[in-house]
Amino acid sequence: MDDAIHVVCPHCNGVNRLPKDRSALAARCGRCHRPLFSGAPVALSSAALQQQVERSDVPVLVDFWAEWCGPCKMMAPIFEQAAIQLEPSVRLAKIDSDREQAAAAKYGIRSIPTLILFRDGQERARTSGAMDLTRLVAWVRQYL
């Protein structure tokens, strides 16, 4: 429908319909009643990532990372700051490529950190390596 957007809850994976004229920042899930956006990246499983990408009208920026990766650790606080600036226009999510090897394989992750921006169920942009906050936010906004 033109008067609503679909937003997938990061907690229960329920699909919510929100009126376009209502602020998504204040919205809560109809199923689990938790906030749909918290101003912080959400950790996702492979299945939850698929639900976010395929069912949400909100673009999803995914950080593929690993605990042992130095540049990933350097990028983590920057990614958190980006969530504050970009939500609710973009869902920021993290996938631990060691724990979620199926997702890493599906998206051909060869180096980390790798950021992939999904919109309308499709990959729209990809970049590898750490970047500062200004560059990260500008990179995302150019594809919105």
Image (tube, grey):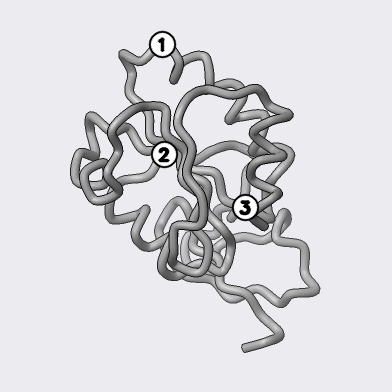
Q: Looking at the rendering, which quadrant does residue 13 occupy? A: bottom left
The residues bearing labels 1 and 3 have C-alpha atoms spaced at a distance of 26 Å
Tell me if residue 42 comes above or below residue 66 in the rendering: below
Q: Label 1 neighbourhood size at 10 Å, few (<14), some (14-19), many (20+)?
A: few
Q: Nearer the viewer, mark 1 or mark 2?
A: 1
**Where's residue 51, x and y in %?**
37, 63
Tell me if residue 40 comes above or below residue 46 in the rendering: above
In this rendered view, identify the residue nearer to me: 60 or 130: 130
Residue with the most extreme right position: 21
Disc 1 element: helix
Judge left or right: residue 108 versus residue 75: left
Q: Which quarter of the rendering shows the N terminus?
A: bottom right
Q: Which quarter of the rendering shows the C terminus?
A: bottom right
Tell me if residue 51 comes above or below residue 105 in the rendering: below
Judge left or right: residue 64 versus residue 110: right
Q: Label 2 neighbourhood size at 10 Å, few (<14), some (14-19), many (20+)?
A: some
- The numbered dot on residue 43 is 2
Question: Residue at the location (47% across, 67% down)?
Answer: 31
Q: Nearer the viewer, mark 1 or mark 3?
A: 1
Question: Residue at the location (67% across, 29% down)?
Answer: 81
The residue labelled by disc 3 is 90
**Where's residue 22, x and y in %?**
77, 69
Residue flagged by tag 1: what amino acid is it?
Answer: Gly
Question: Residue at the location (26% across, 46% down)?
Answer: 103
Disc 3 element: loop
**Where's residue 85, x and y in %?**
74, 39
The residues bearing labels 3 and 2 have C-alpha atoms spaced at a distance of 15 Å
Q: Looking at the rendering, which quadrant does residue 48 occupy? A: bottom left
The residue labelled by disc 1 is 70
Residue flagged by tag 2: what amino acid is it?
Answer: Ala
